[in-house]
Image (cartoon, helix red, strand yellow):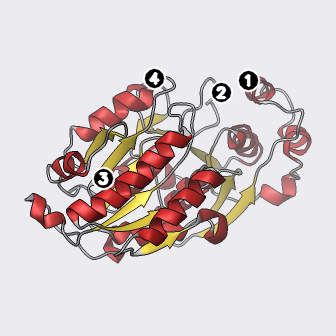
């Protein structure tokens, strides 16, 4: 099976399509070709949305004019996988032109879905739409590559535990002030001192430079630091080595990193910075929390004791999210 993956500038989107391609490759022989999709400057989101609803226009011409992609570059594939809004129109056009099946990860938000074989959504409330299916956010994480995490039953169990802090940054849903970054750093130092936690810290594509510098200084001040991962220097995928920690702590602005922590079969704590707006992510995270492997704590006034109390209530996930992804993918890839 030949798979074309469409990636934009967001590292998280690239990891989602890579995760699906890797998952499909576990059950059949695949050849994966990655294609960067960057819309032309004048082809805005609204223009792309409109073009998706005009099936009488030439897909070859639209692909060239919208993305600078020639038709011959994308022929001969059985499956197309995309994530991120810039990839939606490209996938639709290639599917129209070649007949390949297009699988998209995320919300399509009004784009025409007639030429989409499957839309994988992380929100159960969206699963009723045609060709939509609810499943966890895909990732390339393979939990069998990590040792089982330490079990937390009592507060004393946290002494010497390895906890990975994965740091996102400002988003449409959560904001970050300089004071909040300082509070996060202070919490990390306090948790080492009071709980005996051994920290690893990773930044991401959205982490501001000032926050990265503060976190790096904090990491250098830890007595039992384990690992530092700077996204700016090491790039996408560098964080994967931290998912072998006993627990994962994620800033709650990143649902993708929360999903990856759970995919690694680790208990996950989300740290909430100040809210900018409510979104459907809030309701979905509440559903995930009800499963017993994820909890959120507010950053404002966060003390190590409260963090520890939340963590010992969690248990590692018992259901591999890849099972649900395979379930929704099989009807599509089986026919490709």
Q: Earlier in the sequence, mark 2 or mark 3?
A: 2
The residues bearing labels 1 and 4 have C-alpha atoms spaced at a distance of 30 Å
Quick check: 16 above or below 46? Answer: below
In the shown orientation, is residue 57 left or right of residue 288?
Answer: right
Q: Secondary structure at mark 3?
A: strand
Pick whichever, 142 or 50, lies toward us.
142
Question: Is disc 1 surrounded by few (<14), some (14 to 19) or many (20+) residues within 10 Å?
Answer: some
Image quadrant in which you'd find residue 105: top right
The x, y position of residue 20, in whole percent, is 50, 57
Q: Earlier in the sequence, mark 1 or mark 4?
A: 1
Q: Which residue is mark 3?
A: 268
Q: Secondary structure at mark 1?
A: loop
The x, y position of residue 48, in whole percent, is 77, 30
The residues bearing labels 4 and 2 have C-alpha atoms spaced at a distance of 26 Å
Q: Earlier in the sequence, mark 2 or mark 1?
A: 1
Image quarter hosting the C terminus: bottom right
Task: Return the mark for residue 112.
Answer: 2
The x, y position of residue 91, in whole percent, is 70, 44
Q: Earlier in the sequence, mark 4 or mark 3?
A: 3
Q: Which residue is mark 1?
A: 53
Q: Which mark lies nearer to you, 1 or 4?
A: 4
The residues bearing labels 2 and 3 have C-alpha atoms spaced at a distance of 36 Å
The residues bearing labels 1 and 3 have C-alpha atoms spaced at a distance of 41 Å
In the shown orientation, is residue 315 left or right of residue 173?
Answer: left
Q: Which residue is mark 4?
A: 278
In the shown orientation, is residue 323 left or right of residue 335?
Answer: left
In the shown orientation, is residue 29 left or right of residue 319?
Answer: right
C-beta proximity under 8 Å, tags 2 and 1: yes
Q: Secondary structure at mark 4?
A: loop
Image quadrant in which you'd find residue 47: top right
Q: Which mark lies nearer to you, 1 or 3?
A: 3
Question: Is disc 3 surrounded by few (<14), some (14 to 19) or many (20+) residues within 10 Å?
Answer: many
């Amino acid at each position: 099976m030949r798979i074309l993956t469409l990636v934009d500038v967001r590292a998280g989107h690239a990891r989602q399509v890579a995760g699906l391609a890797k998952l499909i490759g576990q059950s059949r022989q695949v050849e994966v070709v990655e294609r960067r999709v960057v819309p032309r400057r004048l082809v805005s989101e609204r223009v792309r949305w409109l073009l998706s609803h005009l099936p009488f226009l030439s897909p070859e011409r639209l692909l060239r004019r919208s993305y600078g992609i020639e038709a011959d570059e994308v022929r001969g594939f059985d499956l197309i996988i995309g994530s991120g809004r810039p990839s939606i129109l490209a996938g639709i056009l290639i599917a129209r032109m070649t007949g390949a099946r297009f699988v998209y990860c995320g919300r399509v938000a009004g784009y025409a879905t007639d030429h989409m074989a499957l839309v994988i959504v992380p929100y159960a409330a969206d699963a009723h739409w045609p060709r939509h299916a609810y499943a966890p956010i895909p990732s390339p994480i393979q939990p069998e590559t990590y040792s089982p995490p330490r079990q937390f039953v009592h507060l004393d169990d946290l002494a010497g535990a390895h906890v990975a802090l994965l740091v996102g940054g400002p988003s449409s849903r959560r904001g970050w002030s300089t004071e909040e970054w300082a509070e996060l750093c202070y919490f990390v130092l306090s948790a080492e001192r009071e709980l005996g936690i051994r920290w690893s810290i990773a930044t991401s594509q959205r982490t501001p430079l000032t926050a990265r510098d503060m976190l790096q200084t904090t990491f250098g001040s830890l007595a039992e630091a384990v690992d530092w991962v700077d996204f700016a220097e090491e790039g996408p995928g560098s964080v994967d080595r931290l998912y072998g920690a006993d627990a994962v702590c994620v800033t709650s602005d990143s649902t993708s990193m929360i999903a990856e922590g759970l995919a690694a079969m680790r208990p996950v704590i989300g740290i909430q910075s100040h809210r900018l707006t409510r979104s459907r992510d809030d309701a979905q995270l509440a559903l995930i929390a009800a499963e017993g492997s994820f909890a959120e704590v507010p950053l404002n006034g966060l003390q190590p004791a409260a963090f520890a109390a939340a963590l010992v209530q969690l248990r590692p996930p018992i259901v591999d999210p890849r099972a649900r992804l395979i379930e929704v993918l099989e009807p599509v890839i089986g026919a490709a």
